[in-house]
Image (cartoon, rainbow, N blue to C red):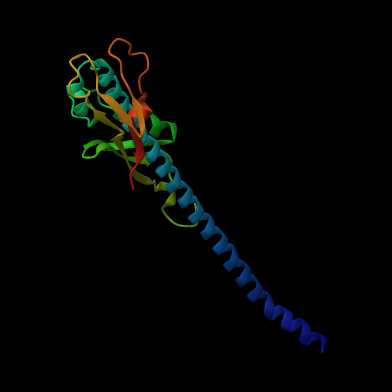
Amino acid sequence: MSPRKYGDAGQAFPIYITVVAGLLFLAFAYLAVGQAAATRNGAQTAADAAALGAAQDRRNQLVGRWMDNLLNPDLWQDIFHGKVEGLDPSCWRAQQLADANDAHVVGGGCEPEWDPLGYTVEVKTNDPVGDSIVPGTETTYATAEARAVIEPRCSLQPPEEGNDNDEDLPQLNCGGQNWDLDADDLSDLPGPDDLFDVHLAD
């Protein structure tokens, strides 16, 4: 009976090797999937940061233009909706934040938008997925796109009728908070986050 027992064990050994090899293959395959997912997530993080950075830079320029025209309220609505000329490009900020996240803006991958106001940015990772059991991953890079919008938060309430003081400025209501601006004392002003909401769009 003993020789037969050893013979059965010998027959089972190749099956054992096959099962172990299959499990190892699955483990390496899952690792490759994880590497690819991590690279894609990194690309999306870089795209989100780049789009938000460009939109925030444009927002800050609009705030600066509004502050330059505080005594000219007829221009406020156009400024709040981005209808101004002479602003500097903001894609430099997108590239800066993409670099900080191990990626770069692809050629033509940073575009301003006007309705609604914002930026769409496409980035590509600096590093590939890396070596794995899946052929070609060592030369495969991840790309991602993100869009950030700039929304005005303020509405204007003109001075009351019958007010003969031409220097009175409109009241601003920004996200439910009222701002009574005094042309003789402009030290208390809403900040960039009060005037505009910058966020990623779906």
Where is residue 130? Give x, y as percent.
47, 47
Q: Is residue 15 above or below residue 66?
A: below
Q: Residue furthest bottom?
A: 1
Where is residue 13? Give x, y as percent.
68, 75
Q: Residue furthest top?
A: 184
Q: Residue at x 21, y 13 (%)?
A: 167
- Whether residue 71 is visible to the viewer of this picture, yes or no, is yes
Q: Residue furthest right?
A: 2
- Whether residue 93 is visible to the viewer of this picture, yes or no, is no
| Of residues 100 and 179, the one drawn nearer to the viewer in this rendering | 179
Q: Left or right: 14 with respect to 35?
A: right
Q: Residue at x 66, y 73 (%)?
A: 16
In what quadrant of the picture does the N terminus appear?
Answer: bottom right
| Of residues 72 and 165, the one drawn nearer to the viewer in this rendering | 165
| Of residues 98 and 193, the one drawn nearer to the viewer in this rendering | 193
Q: Is residue 134 above or below residue 167?
A: below
Q: Left or right: 177 with respect to 28?
A: left
Instruction: Specify the quadrant of the image occupied by residue 70.
Output: top left
Q: Left or right: 72 with respect to 15?
A: left
Where is residue 63? Give x, y as percent.
30, 23
Q: Left or right: 24 with respect to 126?
A: right
Q: Residue at x 25, y 26 (%)?
A: 89
